[in-house]
Image (cartoon, grey):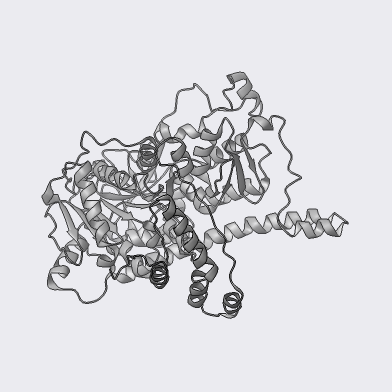
């Protein structure tokens, strides 16, 4: 086994992630600046001051030219990367699956959804083998207006390098893999990457992740090599479920009509031609230099997407764990897992599912699919016990193969393989540990984990949790959350610390399909009182501002009214707050019991 990563390694990985975040932000800013420039040029042609003033309120895209058959198409694509989807259109389901794969949801009310194309959404798209040409072709196909040149160029810029190379753990050896010879040649021009390469046929038994691998499989299970010494193998094909979003025709048109809509019949959506076998090329690298190769690849603007060929991992023992017969995963859970395991390997990334949609079962199913040691990270000790119960409920894992590690329970790890459930705090704690806790932590850091499962993954970018991602050696990382949102800008770090967003479900669709209970959401605006508003405007401290708007007397009166109203109807009521101080004050005012961390 290799040594556990140090805190310096963690800071280095975080610095690399921030570099990619900055690069993505620059590309997004360029798209916005180009759009603003074109809008100002258009508005300057008008001699009417009112028109100029109106144009400053937002982008004006009234000059977009609609296609003749725009009624048959479900969405608008704006030059600033915004996409508006008609939720009442007959092609909504097909268009939704595609847009979720390439864009970020912004707002999804009942009839009209807004999406935004971002560098991160495009990275996620190419991570699931949706190529640049397919993104542009299908988006243009679904759009009521012609695809703006700014959007076309933005897509090409963001995807021309990302996804072109992967870091694959295959047969217990690390490979840099690509479908393009030129990409590997360009990477090998870098001195450090070239030094990390293992020329096939000369490989020695490696350490760490590649320890104990059979030299006979060092070239990828007997695959041949080309003139550059690259290992040639059949590309891991994406499953049909994930590519179906690229093959949907518009409104059930027949083939002749379909051809007319695609530039004189050049469409290949419904092509009956046999598929050509696609090949990939790869070169092996030294396990101890993996982090160096990843860093150099980022500097060359070729960030390596990581995949774990778990089925060919013969070194790490399996966990005896299968789903019980009564376990049934729902359609949307199946689709989310298809994004993770779409090419037969395990991709690192994030799955976003609404509360009550079964994130836990999704994580349990991913764990039993990989069947290697799993470390499951939770936010608190209560969640640890809940996850343990769910693993035992849905799988037949033996009791001695599931372990908890909290401040109260410090169970020993099974010597071969196991599922470990713990908290972010227990792993990230940097102070002095008890002998028992230190022994468990040493065992965690010295083991290779097939999967790192992260519950409520949106908390990971916080400072105290950054080292968690790099302190545990895991071949695949899966984040689960219902709210991929933070008040700061650190949520973008997840795209590179963990992986791209693989799937996101719309709670309104799940409610309509009967998976979730009907929910009525009402937002009550409470004007701030004069004295509170005066203090709020003059407050320099964000904490003071938060206390002022949370304890706004108008809000207190509104809560009191709503509680009494629903009590009179016999409803069950829960009042939530982000601040413990406000919870205590509200409970005292309403003469009701309260629960917080102290209780």
* Residue in the foreground of this view, choosing between 341 and 279: 341
Q: Is residue 349 left or right of residue 385?
A: right
Toward which corner of the image does residue 252 lie, by quadrant?
top right
Q: Is residue 212 above or below residue 512?
A: below
Point out residue 7 in the picture as x, y percentages from the top left corner. 31, 70
Q: Inspect this view and state whether residue 121 appears.
A: yes
Identified at 44% across, 40% down, the residue is: 511
Q: Is residue 516 left or right of residue 33?
A: left
Identified at 83% across, 58% down, the residue is: 50
Residue sitting at the far front: 568
Classify the position of the N terminus by image quarter.
bottom left
Identified at 46% across, 62% down, the residue is: 486
Toward which corner of the image does residue 84 lie, by quadrant?
top right
Q: Is residue 173 above or below residue 130?
A: below
Point out residue 37 in the picture as x, y percentages from the top left corner. 73, 58
Q: Is residue 66 left or right of residue 528?
A: right
Classify the position of the C terminus by image quarter.
bottom left
* Residue in the foreground of this view, choosing between 315 and 415: 415
Identified at 51% across, 34% down, the residue is: 93
């Amino acid at each position: 086994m290799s040594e556990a990563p140090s805190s310096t390694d963690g800071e280095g990985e975080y610095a690399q992630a921030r570099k990619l975040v900055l690069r993505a932000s620059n590309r997004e800013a360029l798209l916005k600046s180009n759009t603003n420039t074109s809008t100002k040029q258009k508005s300057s042609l008008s001699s009417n001051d009112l028109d100029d003033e109106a144009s400053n309120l937002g982008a004006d895209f009234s000059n977009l030219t609609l296609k003749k058959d725009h009624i048959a198409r479900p969405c608008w694509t704006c030059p600033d990367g915004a996409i508006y989807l008609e939720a009442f259109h007959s092609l909504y389901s097909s268009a939704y699956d595609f847009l979720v794969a390439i864009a970020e949801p912004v707002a999804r009310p009942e009839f009209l959804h807004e999406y935004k194309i971002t560098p991160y959404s495009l990275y996620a798209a190419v991570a699931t083998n949706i190529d640049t040409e397919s993104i542009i072709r299908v988006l243009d196909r679904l759009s009521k207006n012609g695809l703006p040149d700014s959007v076309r160029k933005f897509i090409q810029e963001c995807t021309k390098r990302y996804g072109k190379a992967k870091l694959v753990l295959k047969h217990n050896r690390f490979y840099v893999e690509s479908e393009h010879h030129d990409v590997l040649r360009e990477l090998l021009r870098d001195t450090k990457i070239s030094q990390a390469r293992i020329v096939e046929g000369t490989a020695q038994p490696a350490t760490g992740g590649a320890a104990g691998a059979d030299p006979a499989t060092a070239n990828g299970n007997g695959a041949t090599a080309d003139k550059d010494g690259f290992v040639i193998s059949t590309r891991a094909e994406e499953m049909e479920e994930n590519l179906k979003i690229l093959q949907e025709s518009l409104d059930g048109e027949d083939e002749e009509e379909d051809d007319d809509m695609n530039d004189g019949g050049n469409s290949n959506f419904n092509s009956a031609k046999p598929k050509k076998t696609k090949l990939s090329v790869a070169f092996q690298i030294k396990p101890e230099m993996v982090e160096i190769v990843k860093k150099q690849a980022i500097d060359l603007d070729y960030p390596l997407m990581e995949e774990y060929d778990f089925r060919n991992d013969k070194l790490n023992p399996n966990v005896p764990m299968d789903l019980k017969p009564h376990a049934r995963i729902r359609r949307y859970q199946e689709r989310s897992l298809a994004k993770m395991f779409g090419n037969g390997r395990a991709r690192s990334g994030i799955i976003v599912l609404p509360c009550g949609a079964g994130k836990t079962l999704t994580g349990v199913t991913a764990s039993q699919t990989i069947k290697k040691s799993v470390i499951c990270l939770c936010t608190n000790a209560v969640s640890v016990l809940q996850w343990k119960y769910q693993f035992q409920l849905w799988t037949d894992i033996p009791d001695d193969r599931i372990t908890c590690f909290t401040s109260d329970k410090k169970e020993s790890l099974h010597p071969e393989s196991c599922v470990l459930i713990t908290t972010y705090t227990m792993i990230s704690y940097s102070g002095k540990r008890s002998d028992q806790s230190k022994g468990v932590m040493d065992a965690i850091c010295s083991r290779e984990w097939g999967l790192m499962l992260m519950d409520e993954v949106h908390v990971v970018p916080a400072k105290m949790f950054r080292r968690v991602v790099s302190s545990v050696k895991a071949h695949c990382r899966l984040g689960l959350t219902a709210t991929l949102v933070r008040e700061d800008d650190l949520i973008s770090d997840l795209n590179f610390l963990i992986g791209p967003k693989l799937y996101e479900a719309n709670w309104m669709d799940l409610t309509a399909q009967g998976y979730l209970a009907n929910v009525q959401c009402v937002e009550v605006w409470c004007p701030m009182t004069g004295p509170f508003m005066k203090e709020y405007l003059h407050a320099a401290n964000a904490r003071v501002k938060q206390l002022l708007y949370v304890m706004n007397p108008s809000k207190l009166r509104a809560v009191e009214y709503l509680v009494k109203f629903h009590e009179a109807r016999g409803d069950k009521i829960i009042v939530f707050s982000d601040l413990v101080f406000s919870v205590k004050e509200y409970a005292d005012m309403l003469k009701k019991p309260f629960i917080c961390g102290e209780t």
